[in-house]
Image: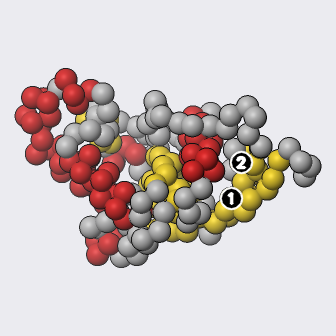
Amino acid sequence: MGNNRTVRELSWNGPFAWPGFEKDTALPQLPKTCGVYLQTFNYEKGYLIYCAGLTRISFKDRFIQHTRNYKNGKYNVLDMTSVLKGKRKLIWRGWGYYREHQDEFLEKKTNIIKAVNKQLLHFRIFLAENGNEKRFIERLEASIMNNLYNQPPPMSLIPDQGMFLAPRRGKEKLIIVKNKCDSILYGLPNYLEI
């Protein structure tokens, strides 16, 4: 494919359960490896992607951090009835909002935590155990999220906006990623430029 680009094949494994929900979902636990992950929800005959992320620590340890942030009000919490129909409806706005609205969070905490647990139960995690190649996994995460934002609904509606992303820089060699998965991951193309 020329000197300006390379092609890499990437296998997405899953679905895995969110840590602590393995028995409830009858899904396997996350491995102790690292790489890029997709947080997804069941939708039609496959899965809608909510978020792509990367971790340089084990997937399990990263998701334990995520759980803590959800339960402290730092992350957005979605209404699962809506999401499973391909619609986005917030129950709690995390990210920057929670800092100035701690009183509101504490007032609504019981209901928010119930919604958090429901969301974590419904997550289906897919992994690309591609190690810790810093720029590759940063570029992959950015490309997946930017691709989702440009998809038609519902693929573009479900993900959070405003993530810190580190896409390919001008002089970096173009990489074409060939995505392989036994499941349907809506919004993830067979080939992705990163």
**Pointers 1 and 2 in contact (C-beta within 8 Å):** yes
Q: Where is residue 180 in the image (x, y as percent from the top left)?
A: 67, 64
Residue at coordinates 81% horizontally, 53% vertically from top-left? 6
Q: Where is residue 62 in the image (x, y as percent from the top left)?
A: 37, 57
Residue at coordinates 20% horizontally, 48% vertically from top-left? 71
Residue 44 appears in view: no
Q: Nearer the viewer, residue 137 or 24?
A: 137
Q: Quadrant of the C terminus?
A: top right
- Say what secondary structure mark 1 lies in: strand
Residue picked out by circle 2: 192
Amino acid type indicated by mark 2:
Leu
User: In the rendering, which numbered label is found on residue 167?
Assistant: none
Q: Is residue 178 above or below residue 95?
A: below
Q: Which of 67 and 117 is in front in this view?
A: 67
- Say what secondary structure mark 2 lies in: strand
Q: In this view, does 23 lie above or below 83?
A: below
Residue at coordinates 90% horizontally, 52% vertically from top-left? 1
Please rate how many residues cluster around mark 2, counting C-alpha atoms within 10 Å: few if below 14, some from 14 to 19, many from 20. Answer: some
Q: Which of 11 and 90 is in front in this view?
A: 11
Residue at coordinates 36% horizontally, 65% vertically from top-left? 60
Horizontally, residue 143 falls left or right of residue 30, namely: right
